[in-house]
Image (cartoon, grey):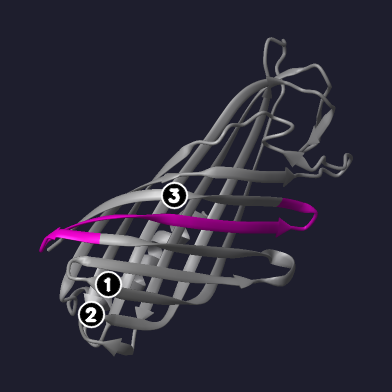
Amino acid sequence: MLRTILLVSAFVLLAPGLALAQLVELEGRYWFTSLDARVRVDSDSLSGTNVDFKDDLGIDDDDAPGVRLTFGLPLNNKIRLAYTFLKFDSNTTLDQTINFNGSTFGAGTQVGSDLEIHYGRLGWIWQPIAIPGILKLGPMVDLKGVVIDANIETRNVTPSTEEGKELGLILPTIGAALDFTAIPKVDLFAEISGLPAGSLGHVLDAEAGIRINPLPFFTISAGYRIFDVKIEHSDDSAKARLHGPFVGASVRF
């Protein structure tokens, strides 16, 4: 449901600007992430364990693809739609007993686990502070949507036990974006956006890097990104922090 709401919201908000777009840029990215994630899911009869997906379930770091579509508008405005998908999985033998979503997975049990993170964002960036050809700086407003889907299943046991939980958060955020042209065809960039949402959780996304424009319609980029999210629903919670370098390439038309 959360994913459907994000898609509908994106269409409604983007539609008026498409006809005014002066430039369209499609960018693909690959993010080399390091993960720190914890999930706790209670039930009516059993308090959940605060499960560390690395220490308790043996999940390793993995890499993530992402895509961004940007519409350039007059007066240093642009609208951006972005999506990143992350998936981590593992098979391990538990060192301690885990209570998750009403089921108990005892110490010594072989389990398989997976963690999926869907992250979409629809943003407006306006950079009124500008030195043509050198500097652009200004605020950005995002509508961010995050879904964290965690699953644990016993292995080599009949009958098997499988439990899963999906937690989601939609949150408007504010921030700033900077672009600086160091030398012709080489740009430095940085942006940060986020917002605490009290008992609902929080979300923060920040990155900095370099863009090189070898051709008028083609750009390659590299940088470092940090993403931090916490989602709370009643007594259930999920936290994930990801960071690491990324590379990307984009075409403009």
x, y percent for residue 51: 75, 39
Label 2: how many residues lie within 10 Å, few (<14), some (14-19) or many (20+)? Answer: some
Residue 37 in sight in this render: yes
Label 1: how many residues lie within 10 Å, few (<14), some (14-19) or many (20+)? Answer: few
x, y percent for residue 44: 86, 44
Label 3: how many residues lie within 10 Å, few (<14), some (14-19) or many (20+)? Answer: some
Instruction: Using the image, tell me which numbered label, if any, was put on residue 41.
Output: none
x, y percent for residue 118: 49, 49
Q: Main secondary structure of the magenta part?
A: strand
Instruction: Using the image, tell me which numbered label, if any, was put on residue 73.
Output: 2
Occupied quadrant, residue 34: top right
Earlier-in-chain disc, 1 versus 2: 2
Disc 1 designates what residue?
182
Badge 3 amino acid:
Pro
Confirm or deny contact between disc 1 and disc 3 (CB under 8 A). no
Extent of the magenta region: 212-237
Kindly report the distance in space between the C-alpha atoms of the residues bearing marks 2 and 3.
29 Å
- In magenta segment, residue 158: no
